[in-house]
């Protein structure tokens, strides 16, 4: 039990320090070693440097090897779409098209289109905030509902549910289950519908309550918004085309190109086409999208080289944060105390979909990262889930979609970095906004996950 206490203390500190803004790259290895040190009290061996270099760092480097191309190209695509003005052009066009009286829909759908195309949720938040603030102010919608609207569009269904999304949370399960980004399309669409319309129902309900109390946009004296210059944005057509190319290219390459190639040579690399075609499809599609976005907007960049350099630097921080959490999880899962924790999570149900959802969601909540929690859960339990799914006759695509959707629930607890960043961008506080953010990004996605577990258990995918 002392080992379990060490894990609990370590996890508690990880959540607290991450919430306070400490870098996960620094605290994750230290707290992993702290948890491992508790094994001494149970008569076990603890080797400080070996645990760090042969446990934590081996797992970290393995994650970087597997996912760095997706992180890199995703960051580059987001940066190109941001600096070229394409992301803003899409947001302005959607907001104008939807029209007056549907400002909340305009914000949510603008974020959704951008993030479904592969642009990071952080870029979406920065791009949409000035537009959303102007729309909400003019319509008299309380500003405290703007962060939940952005979170609903960027942090939920486009991140985990809609088939084909190039976000990393949809890419991680591919290497474990031999699937592609379009796995279990029916379940993905069902989950997306529940998240979108459930979230919209909630935000509109809260808006009507605010209206009944006479609440409007509010007085925000410290609001510092630079009005967007919309006079020189690229056209909507040239802005949206790279996004379509990423999505369509991903589908074509994963379904028709790589699967029909002669890839017997992969045996020399100890892998198969089923294990890599998902990542390969994303890599090629994102690369084509980046080149197209640059070609369409070349003259709009102050410096293409500078834009790409900034994108590369951003990808380093993103992948190292997640990889550090994976390294942390790898150390924790080797501890004797973790077997008790794992047994507790997996004993709730013999249905592998339930165990997968619980482990992915809980670990995402602990780490404050959907991708980190998902990576730890699948690295630890994927083989067990696959064996159980085979016994139940469950398609691996269902495992993929449930894992992806499940990790996008408890990840956005108050200590989540994306939540903290969103509130910082909008100048709002947890007290003002988190109850509504949590409803849209924690509660409703959890309902969506339960729904697809039930459907998936009956063979629907």
Image (spheres, helix red, strand yellow):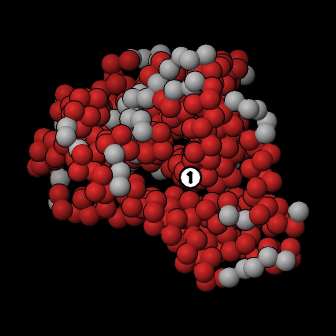
Image point 63% across, 21% down: which residue? 457
Does the image show residue 131?
Answer: no
Q: Residues within 10 Å of mark 1 (few under 14, many from 20)?
A: some
Residue lying farthest to the right in this orientation: 1
Image point 15% across, 41% down: which residue? 292
Decide which of 319, 104 is in the foreground and name it: 319
Q: What count of labels does the image hold?
A: 1
Q: Which residue is mark 1?
A: 379
Decide which of 82, 211 is in the foreground and name it: 82
Q: Residue 194's x, y, as percent?
A: 58, 20
* Residue 388 sits in quarter: top right
Q: Residue 90's x, y, as percent?
A: 30, 32
Asked if residue 207 is positioned above or below residue 23 in the image, the reply reads: above
Does the image show residue 164?
Answer: yes
- Position of 163 with respect to 311 (left or right) is right
Image point 26% across, 34% down: which residue? 259
Q: Quadrant of the N terminus?
A: bottom right
Q: Residue 419's x, y, as percent?
A: 59, 47
Q: Residue 461's x, y, as percent?
A: 50, 20
* Residue 2 sits in quarter: bottom right
Decide which of 296, 259 is in the foreground and name it: 259
Image point 30% across, 52% down: which residue? 267
Element carrying mark 1: helix
- Position of 80 with respect to 409 (left or right) is left
Asked if residue 129 is positioned above or below residue 69 in the image, the reply reads: above
Decide which of 186, 209 is in the foreground and name it: 186
- Position of 431 with respect to 128 (left or right) is right
């Amino acid at each position: 039990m002392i080992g379990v206490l060490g894990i609990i203390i370590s996890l508690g500190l990880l959540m607290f320090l991450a919430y306070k803004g400490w870098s996960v790259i620094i605290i994750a290895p230290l707290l992993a070693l702290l948890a491992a040190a508790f094994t001494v009290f149970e008569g076990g061996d603890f080797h400080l440097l070996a645990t760090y270099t042969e446990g934590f760092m081996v797992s970290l480097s393995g994650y970087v090897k597997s996912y760095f191309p997706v992180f890199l190209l995703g960051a580059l695509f987001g940066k190109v779409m941001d600096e070229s003005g394409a992301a803003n052009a899409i947001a302005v066009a959607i907001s104008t098209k939807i029209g007056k009286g549907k400002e909340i829909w305009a914000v949510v759908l603008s974020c959704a289109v951008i993030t479904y195309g592969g642009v990071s949720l952080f870029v979406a938040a920065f791009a949409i905030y000035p537009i959303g603030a102007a729309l909400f102010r003019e319509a008299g919608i309380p500003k405290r509902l703007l962060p939940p609207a952005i979170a609903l569009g960027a942090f939920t269904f486009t991140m985990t549910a809609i088939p084909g999304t190039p976000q990393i949370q949809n890419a991680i399960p591919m290497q474990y289950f031999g699937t592609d980004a379009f796995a279990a399309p029916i379940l993905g669409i069902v989950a997306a519908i529940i998240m979108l319309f459930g979230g919209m129902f909630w935000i509109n309900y809260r808006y009507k309550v605010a209206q009944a109390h006479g609440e409007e946009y509010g007085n925000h004296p410290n609001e510092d918004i630079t009005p967007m210059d919309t006079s020189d944005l690229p056209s909507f057509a040239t802005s949206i085309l790279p996004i379509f190319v990423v999505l369509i290219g991903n589908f074509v390459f994963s379904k028709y190109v790589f699967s029909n190639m002669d890839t017997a040579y992969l045996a020399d690399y100890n892998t198969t086409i089923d294990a890599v075609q998902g990542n390969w499809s994303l890599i090629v599609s994102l690369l084509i999208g980046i080149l197209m976005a640059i070609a369409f907007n070349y003259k709009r960049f102050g410096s293409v080289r500078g834009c790409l350099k900034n994108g590369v630097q951003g990808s380093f921080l993103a992948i190292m944060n997640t990889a550090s959490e994976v390294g942390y999880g790898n150390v924790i899962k080797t501890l004797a105390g973790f077997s008790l924790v794992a047994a507790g999570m997996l004993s709730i149900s013999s249905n592998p979909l339930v165990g997968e959802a619980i482990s992915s969601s809980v670990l995402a909540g602990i780490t404050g990262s959907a991708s980190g929690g998902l990576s730890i859960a699948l690295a630890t339990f994927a083989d067990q889930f696959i064996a159980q799914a085979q016994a139940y006759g469950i398609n691996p695509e269902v495992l993929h979609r449930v894992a992806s959707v499940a990790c996008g629930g408890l990840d956005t607890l108050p200590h989540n970095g994306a939540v903290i960043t969103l509130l910082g961008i909008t100048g709002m506080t947890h007290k003002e906004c988190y109850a509504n953010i949590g409803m849209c990004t924690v509660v409703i996605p959890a309902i969506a996950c339960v729904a697809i577990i039930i459907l998936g258990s009956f063979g629907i995918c």
